[in-house]
Image: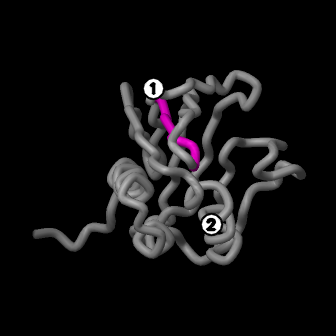
Amino acid sequence: MTDEPLNARELGMRSRAAVHDRDRDGWLALFAADALVQDPIGPSPFDPEGKGHRGIDAIAAFYDTVIAPSEAVDFEITQSYLAGDEVADVGVIRTTIAGGTHQAVVHVVMTYRTDGAGKIASLRAYWEFDRLELIELGS
């Protein structure tokens, strides 16, 4: 067993697992106190000013308003590139919307940067809100 802090790839995997498992407290515990979440980067209905969500309280509010209302969030990572204190993960996010009748599908590049002490300093998601696919789920 090693005392090395988690690297960015490991933090990204734990972040996605916590979201998938609907583990709000576990997800928030992965972030440094002054961390930044931009999902997606730039202005969107989730972040009209496009400045992101900085600090645990703002990240918790993002979770409560964007992630928590969903029925399920599934991630499929097809490529991952670890470089220094950062990782870029390429894949697809499938979010089953509250009510379970539709699924939002986005193709994404997610970057995670560690603070060097085993916490996420930033999570940035590159995806285009206008290219989100809304799929009707079967009954």
Q: Is residue 93 magenta?
A: yes
Front residue of this view, candidates 38 and 66 = 66
Which residue bears the numbered disc 1?
138
Coloring applied to the structure: one colour
Above/below status of 26 relative to 14: below
The part of the image, by quadrant, that contains residue 23 is bottom left
Q: Mark 1 or mark 2, which is nearer to you? A: 1
> Who comes first in sequence, dot 1 or dot 2?
2
In the rendered view, tell whether residue 1 sits above or below residue 70. below
Q: Secondary structure at mark 1?
A: loop
Marks 1,2: beta carbons within 8 A:
no
| Identity, as a three-letter code, of the amino acid under mark 2 | Asp
Residue in the picture at 73% in, 31% down: 129
Badge 1, how many Cα within 10 Å: few under 14, some, many 20+? few
108 vs 75, left or right, is right
Query: Magenta residues, as a range?
Result: 91-98
Q: Residue under circle 2? A: 64
